[in-house]
Amino acid sequence: GLASSADVRLLTPEAKIGFPAARLGAVLPMGCTLRLNAIIGSGHSRELLLTGRTVDAQEARRIGLVHFIVPRENLIAEANRLTAEILQGSDTALEMTKQMVNQELLSQIRQYSLMAAENFAYLAFTDDWKNRIRAFVGTKEQ
């Protein structure tokens, strides 16, 4: 979900990214699915969300999930460079631009946030969710 909230996304060549919520018996909260749909389209979004599949940096770039693939040793410098480039714009114009770009999405997020919270709350009390979380944590510890 965090990656879908960023304006510009960078990944290292060896990085992988995924959305395993469904495999864990959960749902993504607070409009993450809407943001993901807006970023990579409904088809890619559905496939990643429903399968919980992890993708490598090259596939993430190909489907539009990340903008840049940057060597690990250059990641912070490139993030700082991009930030400086963005900050060359007028503060007011940048704020207004973000508001305009995000307006439709924010409207949809407000509409669906309650549904997402209700779904997450329901799933969090199911035995299926508890068992899947235990299994997931167990595989990470090994």
Image (cartoon, grey):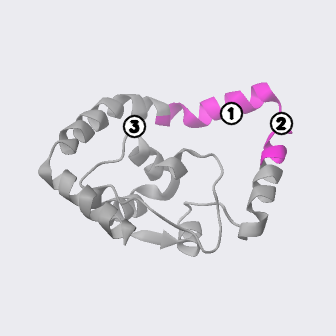
Classify mark 3: residues with Cα within 10 Å, few (<14), some (14-19) or many (20+). Answer: some
Residue 84 position in % (x across, y down): 84, 45
Q: Can you identify the residue that label 3 sits on?
A: 30
The disc labelled 2 sits on which kind of residue? Gly
Q: Element at badge 1?
A: helix
The foreground one among 64 and 32 is: 32
The disc labelled 1 sits on which kind of residue? Thr
Q: Can you identify the residue that label 2 sits on?
A: 89
34 drawn magenta: no
Residue 65 position in % (x across, y down): 54, 60
The foreground one among 44 and 21 is: 21
Residue drawn at (79%, 43%) of the image: 86
Q: Are marks 2 and 1 in contact (CB under 8 Å)?
A: yes
Task: Please indicate whether residue 61 sits to the left or right of residue 123 in the image.
Answer: right
Is the residue 19 above or below the residue 80 in the image?
A: below
Q: Can you identify the residue that label 1 sits on?
A: 97
Q: Element at badge 3?
A: loop
Residue 136, quarter of picture: bottom left
The residues tagged by marks 1 and 3 sit, at their Cα atoms, a distance apart of 22 Å
Q: Earlier in the sequence, mark 2 or mark 1?
A: 2
Find the magenta span and give its range. Answer: 83-105
Decide whether the magenta segment is chiefly helix, strand or loop.
helix
Classify mark 1: residues with Cα within 10 Å, few (<14), some (14-19) or many (20+). Answer: few
Q: Element at badge 2?
A: loop
- For discs 2 and 3, the disc positioned in front in the rendered view: 3
Residue drawn at (51%, 48%) of the image: 2
Residue 11 position in % (x across, y down): 63, 64
Residue drawn at (64%, 73%) of the image: 13
92 drawn magenta: yes
